[in-house]
Image (cartoon, rainbow, N blue to C red):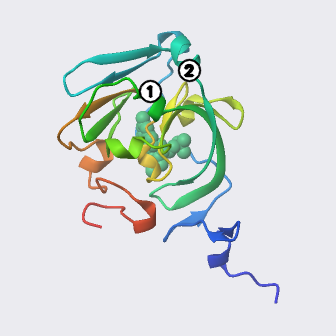
């Protein structure tokens, strides 16, 4: 039998890598809710505000001087495409948040251009999230979020804010751009949390 059923195309490395309702693509689709902002690295800043309003900031030079990691992860978009084994370089949020004093539970991520998305703070920690600035060994293309984007691959890809400019830590959960529009407030692809109430 040489016929391979479509359901098996996502099975690799001996595991089931494709969350329910997803299909595999080798393309890298661009999904942006508005125009691509073009931010020159010399004008880029990344700011973390804690719940007391205290700011921690990096400019491009200080950010790219931080120790970075190579990250190989699968991406899952709520529009049902998944792309496996993508390779990035970025700075871990564990490192960026290490000296930030906080007891907050929630984060609103803000992007150049106005996009927002919300997450529990714990989903940014313990090796689960990065601010990525290279894709496939090249500087991150503006369409995919360059100079730098958030990468939170264990959640649907709308949480991985492109053109990221900062985080606001908060004791209360507010909803971001897609979450306000009816998408799930958390967005676990393995639980198929696509829309509010899923
Ligand atoms: N700033 C910003 N970030 C964003 C978006 C956006 O519209 N603006 N779209 C999100 C969605 S819905 C997806 S699926 C991914 C797509 O990333 P890509 O265009 O690199 O594939 O970016 C996410 N991050
Ligand atoms: Mo998306």
Q: Is mark 2 within 8 Å of ligand 1?
A: no
Residue to which mark 1 is pinned:
96
Instruction: List the single residue furthest toward the bottom.
Output: 1
Q: Residue at x 50, y 49 (%)?
A: 153
Image-quadrant location for residue 47: top left
Work out whether residue 14 or residue 44 is closer to the camera in this orientation and state it. 14
| Marked residue nearer the N-terminal end (2 or 1) | 2
Residue 31 seen: no
On residue 66, which mark appears? 2
Expressed as whole percent of the image width and height from the top left, the position of residue 154 reads 48, 53
Query: In this image, 74 relative to 137: left or right?
Result: left
Residue 172 seen: yes
Q: Residue at x 21, y 28 (%)?
A: 51
Q: Report the quarter where the C terminus lies.
A: bottom left
Expressed as whole percent of the image width and height from the top left, the position of residue 68 reads 60, 28
Query: In this image, 173 relative to 21: left or right?
Result: left
Expressed as whole percent of the image width and height from the top left, the position of residue 126 reads 46, 43
Numbered disc 2: secondary structure: loop
Expressed as whole percent of the image width and height from the top left, the position of residue 35 reads 45, 31
On residue 111, which mark appears? none
The Cα–Cα distance between marks 2 and 1, rounded to whole angstroms, is: 9 Å
Q: Are marks 2 and 1 in contact (CB under 8 Å)?
A: yes
């Amino acid at each position: 039998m040489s016929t391979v059923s479509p359901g098996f195309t996502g099975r690799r490395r001996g595991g089931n890598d494709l969350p329910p309702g997803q299909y595999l693509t080798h393309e890298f689709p661009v999904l942006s809710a508005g125009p691509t902002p073009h931010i020159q690295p010399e004008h880029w800043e990344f700011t973390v505000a804690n719940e007391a309003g205290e700011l921690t900031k990096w400019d491009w030079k200080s950010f790219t001087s931080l120790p970075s990691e190579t990250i190989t992860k699968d991406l899952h978009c709520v529009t049902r495409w998944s792309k496996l084994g993508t390779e990035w370089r970025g700075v871990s949020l564990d490192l960026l948040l290490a000296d930030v004093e906080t007891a907050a539970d929630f984060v609103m991520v803000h992007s150049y251009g106005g996009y927002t998305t919300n997450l529990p703070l714990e989903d940014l920690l313990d090796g689960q999230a990065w601010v990525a600035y290279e894709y496939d060994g090249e500087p991150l293309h503006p369409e995919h979020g360059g100079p730098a984007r958030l990468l939170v691959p264990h959640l649907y890809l709308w949480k991985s804010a492109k053109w990221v400019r900062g985080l606001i830590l908060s004791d209360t959960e507010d909803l971001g751009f897609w979450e306000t529009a009816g998408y799930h407030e958390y967005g676990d692809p393995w639980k198929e949390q696509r829309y509010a109430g899923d």
